[in-house]
Image (spheres, helix red, strand yellow):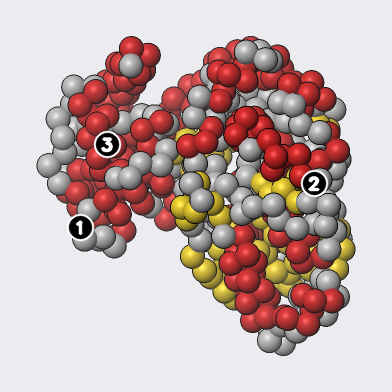
Amino acid sequence: MNCIAIDIGAGSGRIVRGRFDSDRIALEEVHRFRNGMRFLDGHYRWGIDSIFNEVLKGLKKASRCKEPPSSIGLDTWGVDFVLLDAEDRLLELPVAYRDSRTDGMMPLFHERLGAETIYKKTGIQFMQLNTLYQLFSMKRSSPGLRKRARRLLMIPDYLNFLLTGKKCMEFTNATTTQLLNAAKRDWDKDILGAIPVDGGLFSKPVEPGTVLGTLSDSVRARTGLGPIPVIAPATHDTGSAVASVPASGKDWAFISSGTWSLMGRELRRPICTKAAMERNFTSEGGVQGTFRFLKNIMGMWLVDGLRRSFPSMLPYGRLESQARKTGPFTCFVDPNSRKFLNPRSMKAAFNAYFRATGQSTPASQGSYFRCALESLALSYRSVIEELGQLRTGPINRIHIIGGGSRNRLLDQMTADATGLPVHAGPVEGTAVGNLLVQAIALGHIRDIGEGRMLVRNSFNIEHYVPGHTNDWDEAWTRFQQLRETADEKARQD
């Protein structure tokens, strides 16, 4: 049996064929393409039609394989959405979550409905990029657009609509909106009413593993594929990634490492307490009735941004080599500072942070790179400590999955900073988790536990043992002090 995983991130997309053979999974990349925001009509937007054309190219390549796929599943990033009119036409290209239209929207909305009330209902981390604040901004700046809307679909839901003609909203991505009541697993009327937005825009979310339909006639004609079932995996890419964690037992934390670092634990129910809100954790939907209790940390976005900020973009291997040769702990940044959300120059944003916190500017490109990695590792330690304070259970190891798991220096720093062993891999964790949910839906494997056993059998997992912990303890103290200084400076400004 083989399935197709369509995995689309903010920077790139890939179509991967997964072949299930006995107790192993083998992956074959069929198609890869670049993705990114573009500035158009005053906003950063996604070229959703271009993305779909790349999906069709990948499926056409997949049709040339000897064995037709048993199913297809698609995942993307969260929070962003499209609006359709009464004829199911796009009202505009979707605005990207890094756009500035949500600046200042959180405190304005919280005057209508208090933050504690929102969190108690949704359990979702407060970030200005959440769908809630995007819709609130749209209501204020584009009321005519909102009035013409008849259906809202998240990005993967819209792409699945283009594939099948069926309009559905999948649960894991729906939770990222901060509009879904975690206990009821449906849209919260109080939050929708406070925007206000018509509840008729939303359909009740379907669970991961739902068969949405088969490829439409037009897609079949353009790709050469037959009436292949399209299955909703965890359509939020982090949900699919966490499904691939090659863990057993319950004493582990995960880091889904890519553009963002999503770090936390897999739990059976959401945590919507005041203590969790004060630490800004989020309870996002997972597979087979689970929730991902995690924090969003700006991840390799920092590294990629720095790389683009210098005149010559060095290969990642060269940057890592330079970073290893530079002195440790010369400077730090808070990865989640708003300065780094979408700066024109990441290097300039780093320099502004150094000035605000009284730190010296790094002397080399490798020093900037090392600063970013050390700051991420220390942020991971912060999350581990907060998970302990929230009493989520013992944590004896960390699993890093996704593209960032290839960064051996960061993997080792994470072990050193947290004092916990680190297991890194699989690299294509999101595609693997996507494939596992399809296999469960088709009855090929029993559950996610069996799927994780397949992952352990199929992929090379690198192991890192913590060391130099005393040095990292000293760095941790400095890191905390600098974050407090930066926060105080931001409040004064």
- Indicate the quadrant where residue 284 lies: top right
Residue type at numbered disc 1 = Pro
Q: Is residue 205 above or below residue 19?
A: above
Instruction: Judge left or right: residue 335 versus residue 430.
Output: left
**Residue wearing tag 3:** 350
Residue type at numbered disc 3 = Phe
**Residue wearing tag 1:** 311
Q: Of 360 and 196, which appears nearest the observer?
A: 196
Q: What crowding class fits label 1: few (fewer than 14 Cα within 10 Å), some (14-19), or many (20 or more)?
A: few
Q: Of 348 and 274, which appears nearest the observer?
A: 348
Q: Earlier in the sequence, mark 1 or mark 3?
A: 1
| Disc 1 to disc 3, C-alpha distance | 16 Å
Which of the two discs, 3 and 2, sits closer to the camera?
2
| Disc 1 to disc 2, C-alpha distance | 45 Å
**Residue wearing tag 2:** 151
Q: What crowding class fits label 2: few (fewer than 14 Cα within 10 Å), some (14-19), or many (20 or more)?
A: many
The residue lying at 36 percent from left, 33 percent from top is 339
In the rendered image, which quarter contains the C terminus?
A: top left
Q: Is residue 196 visible?
A: yes
* SS assignment at label 1: loop
Q: Of 398 and 227, which appears nearest the observer?
A: 227
Residue type at numbered disc 2 = Arg
Residue sticking out furthest to the left: 363
